[in-house]
Amino acid sequence: MNRLFALALALELALGSVVALAQSSTETAVPGADVESLLAVARANNLEVTGMRHEALAAQQRIEQADALPDPRFKLELQDVTKMGAQNPTLWPGDVGRTRYTFTQEFPWFGTRALKREQAEATALGAETQVQNVWADVASRIKLGYAQLYFLQRNLRLNQEVLGLMQRLEQIARARYAGGLAPQQDVIRAQTEQTAMRGELIAMETDLHHGRARMNALLARPIHAELAEPQVLRPLPAAGTLEFDALETRARQHNPQLAAEEARLKATDKGQELALKGRYPTLMLGIAPTQFQNDFKAWDLMLEMNIPLQQGTRRAQEREALAMRDAAQARRDAVATQLQADLSENLDALESAQETEALVSNSLLPQAELNLQSALAGYENAKVDFATLLDAQRQIRQAKLSRIKAQAEGQARLAQIERLLGEDL
């Protein structure tokens, strides 16, 4: 099973390289119009995910290493190289008094190798889930970045629309001033509003540039590479259809961070068992044939072991392993508790964003539009002053901005919930 996973991971890495090469060598559509196009590029190119895939593949290779016996040892002893002074010293085995060949093999105590293998398997599983955790984090940042780009782009358009409206209001104020029906202050205030809006447009353009740069960094593309303008938002689940208990169950089953902590806890469990194995000796078995000239006339067998007398040291190692196990369990429980809190917070925030968008779209925005039309007609008929008209313009601008904010907030909360679930809704 582990070999199959290692093969699958290696194939995934190779496929990612092929996809990246194909994308760099062929003309493809500019990503960014929707979230899916950005996620597809990031899945193949993101360097954080690629690095974790290689680490997971390396962890898989440690399983076989953990289960292997230590290399055997060979020892050569040339005894009586002068044959009691009868000849000059020699290093040829057949010309010395005796030549002893020693072959030894170390054997850990029974069950130690199996525990080491299980510990390595748990560590490899943790590395595998860490790949999923890193991808979930990258995908969440992409979804959040897309929602921010959508908000900034729509806010930029809104500001441009309002700037056009203020230019029309300035023309009306100029006409009324020319006819002696309005003070010059109305024209100056309209021009001041336009100047302030142009300053906001500059700030928005800067924020858009920064947002695109961050997105390209997540996609491992050149910082100034072109991105398509965000066109559509992902559909949100209907308000009130998401139940906390059902989502919590899914999160406990699929959250990659929680799964990584579970694997780490299992690895520390095996580490604790290995520490207890330290109470027993390590065996060394050997065979030693002895050569006399060209014949082997003596064979020796050996059994060697270490004597675990340093019990204080071993008890300290056992206490260390137990503390590591308790720490891993505490981290696992902390992640599970925080998972509940974050899920509840984001679920409530998602419902709040949906309710806010519905309220703005169905009530506040129509009311603001009617108020602007009424104020515009009243100003043209000299029934309201220019300050009232500006206030009505600000209300409709604020209403539209609130709707865009609610939409972006809903997308951000959806991304956070999916990050906690470890899968898309």
Image (cartoon, rainbow, N blue to C red):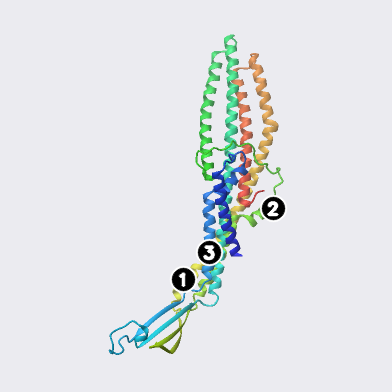
10 Å crowding of disc 1: few (<14), some (14-19), many (20+): few
Residue 57 shown left or right of residue 304 in the figure: right
Residue at image mark 3 = 61
Q: Which label is found at residue 246? A: 2
- The answer to whether mark 2 and mark 1 are in CB contact below 8 A is no
Q: Is residue 372 visible?
A: yes
Above or below residue 334? Residue 417 is above
Q: Please, what is the three-letter code of the amino acid marked with disc 2?
A: Ala
10 Å crowding of disc 3: few (<14), some (14-19), many (20+): some
Q: Nearer the viewer, residue 213 or 371?
A: 213
Q: Tell me the quadrant of the picture where the N terminus can be found.
A: bottom right
Above or below residue 32? Residue 343 is below
Residue 90 shown left or right of residue 204 in the figure: left
Quarter-wise, where is residue 392 in the image?
top right
Residue at image mark 1 = 316
What kind of element bears circle 1?
A: helix
